[in-house]
């Protein structure tokens, strides 16, 4: 039983130390892409798309 707890602790530490910073970096990259001034025109056009009458 003690070995199972140790393996769970190792797995938990691995997730905390590796995956959390990775997902934070991915999130920051997505937010940066979405707020980048060069992409503003494309996102504005996409926002108006449901309101257009073709």
Image (cartoon, rainbow, N blue to C red):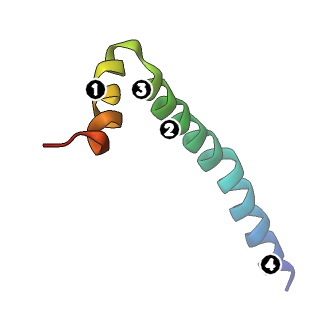
The residues bearing labels 3 and 2 have C-alpha atoms spaced at a distance of: 11 Å
- CA separation, marks 2 and 4? 34 Å
Q: Report the mark closest to the observer, 4 or 3.
A: 3
Residue most extreme to the left = 54
Location of mark 1 (residue): 42
Q: Which of marks 3 and 1 precedes in the sequence?
A: 3
Q: Position of residue 20 (x, y in %)?
A: 64, 46
Which residue: 34% across, 29% down? Answer: 43
Are dots 3 and 2 in contact, CB under 8 Å? no
Q: CA distance from mark 2 to mark 1?
A: 21 Å
How many marks are shown on the rendered structure? 4
State the residue at coordinates (48%, 30%).
Answer: 29
Provide the residue designation for mark 2: 26
* Relative image position of residue 39 (x, y in whole percent): 33, 21
Evaluate if marks 1 and 3 touch, with contact meaning CB atoms under 8 Å apart: no
Mark 4 touches mark 3? (CB < 8 Å): no
The mark lying in front, picked from 1 and 4, is 1
Q: Which mark is residue 3?
A: 4
């Amino acid at each position: 039983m003690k070995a199972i707890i140790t393996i769970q602790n190792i797995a938990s530490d691995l997730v905390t130390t590796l995956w959390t910073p990775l997902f934070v970096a991915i999130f920051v990259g997505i937010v940066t892409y979405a707020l980048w001034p060069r992409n503003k025109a494309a996102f504005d056009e996409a926002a108006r798309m449901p309101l257009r009458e073709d």
